[in-house]
Image (spheres, rainbow, N blue to C red):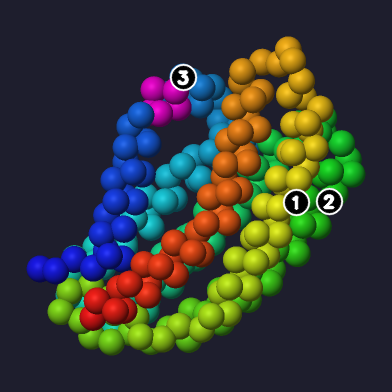
Amino acid sequence: MQISLVTGSLVASCMLLVYDWACTLDREVDYVWSHPLSFSAMLFFLNRYLPFVDAFISMSLSFTQNSPEKCVRHFKVITWFTVVGILLCEVILMLRTYAIWERKRSVMIGFIILILVVAVPSFVFTGLELSSLIYRKAEIGCRLIHASPIIMGAYLLLLLCETVIAVLMLIKAIRHLRPPYSPWVAKLYRDGLLFYLYLLGQPFFYLHISVYDKHAL
């Protein structure tokens, strides 16, 4: 069985997901499981374990025979789980940035407006994109032959949200990262800015593997 670049990337992503979970499970037990359940802990668990649902469904589709109707149905489930996971991640990043800004009311109000501006149109863009999906029958897995590019609107809104968070973090980083500073503070800002750079590179990665995979047909 020939494995496409998209399928290979999916397998690699699932392996990294499991590896990350295994490497950090001890800290999860120490810092989350051993404390009473709270709102932040619920956000953590949802953000932590929803990707496993996406991964399980995606892997099952990639290595089984599926009808085009089944591909559409399952991909809709995967997509909505992904959208919810991304929004949860954004809320967590906003809460962290809100704490860095010493819980200023103006920052909280700004984030509430921002999440509404991003979430509502993103749901619309995602729904329109899912309604445009057309699959053809493949020997193994699912073969997408048409999808509306309107989903890029949701990505641009997400990029706007991340840019606002990154700028707010950068402003505080300039103030806080003056010697002497604690190593964990530097790690906090570094991880936040690295995530922003990762987000910027995502569409180029997906475009590359999509184009490569089409040429391999």
Taking the image as drawn, is residue 119 in sight? no
Badge 3 crowding class, 10 Å Cα cut-off, few under 14, some 14 to 19, many 20 or more, is few
Find residue 16 and report its horizontal and vertical position in percent: 33, 43
Secondary structure under the numbered disc 1 in the rendered image: helix
> What secondary structure predominates along the stretch shown in magenta?
helix
Q: Which mark is residue 186?
A: none
Find residue 115 and report its horizontal and vertical position in percent: 72, 57
Q: Residue furthest top?
A: 180
Evaluate if marks 2 and 1 touch, with contact meaning CB atoms under 8 Å apart.
Answer: yes
Q: Residue furthest left?
A: 1
Query: Dot 3 corresponds to which residue?
Result: 30
Q: Eyeballing the image, is 183 above or below 5?
A: above
Going by the numbered disc 3, the residue's amino acid type is: Asp
The residue depicted at 39 percent of the width and 22 percent of the height is 26
Q: Is residue 181 rendered magenta in the image?
A: no
Secondary structure under the numbered disc 2 in the rendered image: helix
